[in-house]
Amino acid sequence: MQTNLQEILICPICGKKSIQLDKLQCKTCKSFFFELNGIPCLFPSGIKQLQLWNHLLAKFIEEGSNITNALTEELNKHGISSVTKKRLAATLNIHNISHDYLVKTLQQVGLHPKNNSDYKDYSTKVFSKYHQLPLRDWAWFSESAVRFSYGDLLHDENQLALNHIIKLLKTVKSKAQVNCRTLVIGAGAGRLSWDIHCLMQPSMTIAMDFNPLLSYLSKSLIRDKNTIKWHEKIDFPFEQLPTFHEWQLKCPETNAELHQSWIPILADAYAMPFVPHTFDYVVTPWFIDVMSIDCKKLIFLIDKMLKPSGYWINYGPFLYNEKIPESEKYTSEEIKELLRLSHFQVISEATFQTPYSCSPLNKCGRIEQVWGMVAQSPSDRTHMKGQFQSFEPIHSQQPPPWFVMPHLPIPRLMSTKIIPEALTNIAELIDGTRSINEIAALLASHLPEGYNSEDVLYDFLLEYFF
């Protein structure tokens, strides 16, 4: 694994192809990285990312203890019926078992609890938020789940998702599989990345995520071929159903080579540690709406990762949270327009109604509307090599591509207005090769505190571009 992986890695801090996997260090900038249970962790924060996770584990243990104390206090309250006491005692027992098991698993990952005041405001949800994903991916639709089924709620969600992607790929011309590489951004508990890997059988699939627990579980199941015990508690208890169940997670085995060419990595999607234009396919499952930044940047990052004429496969809903600005809660039509402006071609798309996280044990779940899409990246890089011709006018209703997609080069400045001397340094940066992103980054360190370099540049362009 190391040899094949080594040749496509760059340092997420300095961007140089000088990562030494055996030493987990960059030869150029001397930054140190780390691994967890054999998974390379290549974050722009370097070793600080491990310090953060260790702090969060210490905080998670403390939070679990607080819940235990609160439940114990509830159990000892006066005026509670014997039936309620029985329920509270069961709730306390389930909490202690599941919390202790999760802490033990995180320690198996390679984390060690250590408080750090630098990270006191960070949330421990990274460890608990996605507890059901391993069950959805590897347990609920196994043979052992059948005895919990009822009505129409038991669906093989994994197979449905794979069928949808197969449908989307029918219009894609087959690519030669020699040295074909696939990148899955936000691989989670690993099942969809594994199913796509088995379907396409590329020489390498990188399953990238930011969550150490999910990456550890997926590696243990897929590469190490382990069977894992994973607990599920009943949130809405029903008569004659257990209040706690221990599932056996197991990956369906295939030839050993496929298991070894599926490679997990922990990294930041916005500072990916890969040589540009390395992958034939990039897959984003359930990812667009959980991003913390504008989808425009995701399109740029995917364009950067794909080989010419490579394919972006997206599959997921639009469940934007309230923190996302309204202008960035894009619909499928808006994303297709952004892709067109970025010289991508949408090959196929479809909207699917699909069950999601329907637990046969809890007898609950939801139905999601999922948008699937395959888009092909530009066949060459001419759109990124600079535009020296005259530019298109900036219209409020239909601005030019470079004004909407800030990673595209701005045409050389031509203006009928006289530019004030104080702003000529900005005009000089517009040379036909640089983008809004690049120029804004250059301006940032020269502006007074409180000024946003992108806003300053956009104001300049609106004033002096015609």
Image: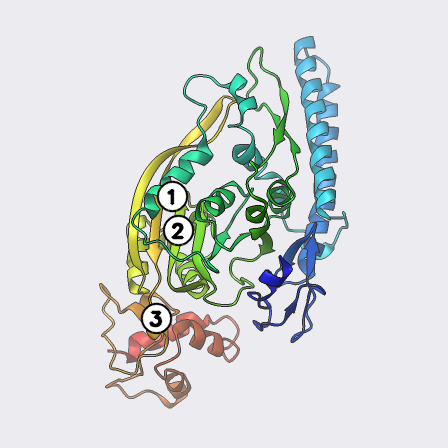
In the rendered view of the protein, which quadrant contains the N terminus?
A: bottom right
Assign a secondary structure to mark 3: loop
User: For mark 3, what is the residue?
Assistant: 380
Residue 184, image x, y percentages: 49, 52
Quarter of the rendering occupied by the C terminus: bottom left
Q: Residue at x 47, y 49 (%)?
A: 201
Whether residues under marks 1 and 2 lie with C-beta atoms below 8 angstroms apart, the answer is yes
Q: Looking at the image, can residue 71 be seen? A: yes
The disc labelled 3 sits on which kind of residue? Asp
Can residue 209 be seen in this snapshot?
no
Image spot of residue 300 (x, y percent): 41, 64
Foreground pick, 385 / 180: 180
Tell me the distance, in whole angstroms, between the alpha carbons under discs 1 and 2.
Answer: 8 Å
Say which residue label 1 marks: 165
Q: Position of residue 205 (x, y in %)?
A: 52, 53
Q: In this view, does 6 lie above or below 191?
A: below
- The answer to whether marks 3 and 1 mark residues whose Cβ atoms lie closer than 8 Å is no
The residues tagged by marks 3 and 1 sit, at their Cα atoms, a distance apart of 26 Å
